[in-house]
Amino acid sequence: MSELLDIATRVAGWANDGEQVEAFVVHETETEVRAYEGEVESFTRAESQGVGVRVIVDGKQGYAYAGTLDDTALQETLREARDNASFAEPDEFNGLAVPDGVEPASLELWSDTVGAFPTEDKIALAIELERAALAADTRISGIESAEYIDTAYESAVATSTGIAAAARETGCYVSVYTLAEADGETQTGFGFSIGRDPSELDPAIAAADAADRATRLLGASKPGSERLTVVFDPWVTAQFLGIVGHTLTGEAVLKGRSMFADRLGDAVANPMITLVDDATDPAAFTASALDGEGIATRRTPLIVDGELQAFLHNAYSARRAGSSSTGSAVRGGFKSGPSVGAQALTLLPGTQSQADLIAGIDNGFLVQGVSGLHSGVNPVSGDFSTGAEGLRIRDGELAEPIREVTIASTVQRLLQDVTGIGDDLQWLPMSSAGVSLVVGDVTMSGA
Amino acid sequence: MLDHELINRTLSTAMRTGGEFAEVFVEDKRSSSAVLDDGRVEELTSGRDRGAGIRVVVGDTTGFAHTADLSEAGLSAAAEAAAAAARGGGGGAKVVAVSPIDVERSAPVRIPPEDVAKATKVGLLTLANEAARAQGSAISQVSARYGDSRRRILVANSDGVLAEDDQVRTLFSVSCVASGDTGLQTGRESTGRTVGFELFDEADVEEMGRRAAERAITKLSARPAPSGAVPVVVGPGGGGVLFHEACGHGLEADLVGKGASVFANRVGEQVASPLVTLIDDGTMAGEWGHFAIDDEGRPAGHNVLIQDGVLTDYMWDQLRARKEGRLSSGNGRRQSYQHLPMVRMTNTYITAGHDDPEAIIADTDSGVYVAQLGGGQVNTATGDFVFGMTEAYLIENGEITDPIREGNLIGNGPEVLTRIDRLGHDFAMGSPGTCGKDGQGVPVGDGTPTLRVTSLTVGGTAA
């Protein structure tokens, strides 16, 4: 780890007078085992590394990256970032993060067990996963993929403004996609189990979930169109929160791309909604003590009792908003600079189970899966329309499966129309947690 | 890119423990981009990525390893790792000798982007920004992006194949936000081709800025989209995404082979309206999904998938084709040297029909006209797919009337294919796309004439 920080610090140290330089260095190893029909279908060992350099001079910003870490590449990358900066236009708010004195949370995200886990055991896990999924239900007709993956990720960021931070984490998961068949009809399902080290993995749960998801939709039909109450499964809620999080970033707000830009202090959601972003929560799979600029992450309540209270910021958006960074700089790898984003979003859970919530609904739709979030949801306008599948709710009970419908509303209305939150909070492999969510008056479009 | 003797030694190392097939994929990719947002040129980015991915196949098992170290030591270590991963037992030494295959090279790039001054690239952004903002005060935000890449690849395998390609792509897009009493709306316009900076001989960035702005402004007065099944007319170029999702993915041999496609075991059957001829064609020079060789060293192909509604073939990569004892169709692609190849589309299109596009609209009493589609998603096993409409209008009494708000359309591939009842003579290619599969993104193109689907479910909120 110190080796990456050495490299980052060395590059940052090459800054000229009047110039700010940031270096972000990563190193990652990954093992992926795919099983198919009881054999290893593919086995991948991957090791990758890279550096991204950001230069700010006279308020102008440039960026460059390279997939190697030798000295020649580092120097060439810095030179290229400098040259790129000279073609940008100045912005008085441009500038790298500076240490803010906030102590990073103490999180144990690294396990030596991952590195020591024998190859044969990884293969055995993948094969066992496939076997368990096939055996989970007689209607399971095949497996699309069954895999074991582990990763060890190390990163360091250093700047000429005094940031020098390093982090590392391990993770592993098993995931399986099943095919179920009955009466000539096929449905699919997925299941997973995730952990910091292999001892936390449970292939049986992954297999059972995948079998359940695939079989529960067998015999599904396409209903007519109507307005009704929907219940989002935790998996769906987590994806919805991801969209909401995007609208609450300083970047979207300052650039006029958020419908919540002028709404601080307003009641933007039902009073039962409290939404918090907190990457210091060790239960989140995306937990991280440091953000993409090396600033300590922290707990940021965004919506409290329905009232909009804060936006997320990185160094740039904070400076421009006259605020301070919330430690929300996020990076999608070393090939681009940091943007602003939520890292571990969660709703304050309610007290009722999903079954209790459903018991109170006469006519509704338990949405177990959505598709086309990237194509049917516009985070700027708030228009929300996605493909959906799940189970009909009749007189407080789960009824027949339905598929090939859409549900539509707007992000703004969905937040206002929430009428219930479950007690079933669970962290999922994305930057938000899921919980059952009841939303009234949503349009379902079908036949 | 690499010395032939070094390639031979690397492949021999990969085969040493009993591999049946080994492959070295070398990639050297340079990219540059520039972004204008919020009224100023915000940032330029450039970078380089190079390395090699080595694959060894033993029986049904593939071992894969990659390295950014292209020295003999680095390649040898990766070859050994891949071979070990494939768990080859026994086996004797196998000597590999590669020789270049004959490939029809793409037309040379006329203006290599690397020869163009950064100031010139940045200048395009400013032009687009100014043109977009000149469309009216309702335009509250504009972002524009320029991007180019040069990807040189070399593929060599134990069958003796050696092939190289030099792929240059250039891309430009403009996104606008309009604000009004009804809130915010967005409009986007993009163009991308497998060419150099000569892209801008044809692409007028100011016109793109104006069109993106108009799109956003038009949508400020958009009505809620209908909810339910209605006839849908898709404009020229716009419908490619529909076929990409409705059946393209389902015709990929890897998914077919695992029974994860509704089109499995249906070759020779009528799967679509007789009007439909669907082609996947990597040879279309200049198009976004074009290349000379795929990422397994196979020349790009012109592959007819559906002829007059009858399913004629699937798309194949090396691995799946080997199993069937046939040749790959040139559809083996990967995101980078760090990824295993799989079956992917290239440029997928429906050939033109005979109808007058205006007559198609005039003959539609009421429905929806989709001028621009967004992305989509499909479950190949069930055939259920969605795709977004980013510019759409109502059709009332045979005429295009009010704009409608964004939303998804949902349908089932096999059903929708049989419901295409009109096809225009106005073929056009659509916008450049990035197709995602199994976590890997590759550039793809698509195209269609104006077409009508008799019934598709529109996911709006209007009763």
Image (spheres, rainbow, N blue to C red):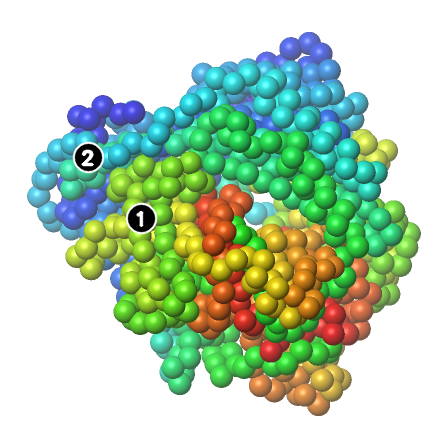
Q: Quadrant of the C terminus of chain A?
A: bottom right
Label drawn at residue A410:
none
Q: Can you say whether B300 is above or below A137 in the image?
A: above
Residue beneath disc 1: B302
Residue B274 percent coordinates (x, y): 38, 68
Q: N-terminal of the two: label 2 or label 1?
A: 2
Q: Distance between the residues labelled 2 and 1?
A: 18 Å
Chain to which mark 2 belongs: B
Q: Which residue is drawn at 58% across and 40% down?
A: B190
Q: Residue B21 location in percent, x, y?
A: 19, 46
Horizontal and vertical percent position of residue B151 = 40, 31
Label 1 sits on what residue type? His
SS for callout 1: strand
The residue labelled by disc 2 is B101
In the image, residue B193 above or below residue B275: above
Q: Which of B301 and B341 is in front in this view?
A: B301
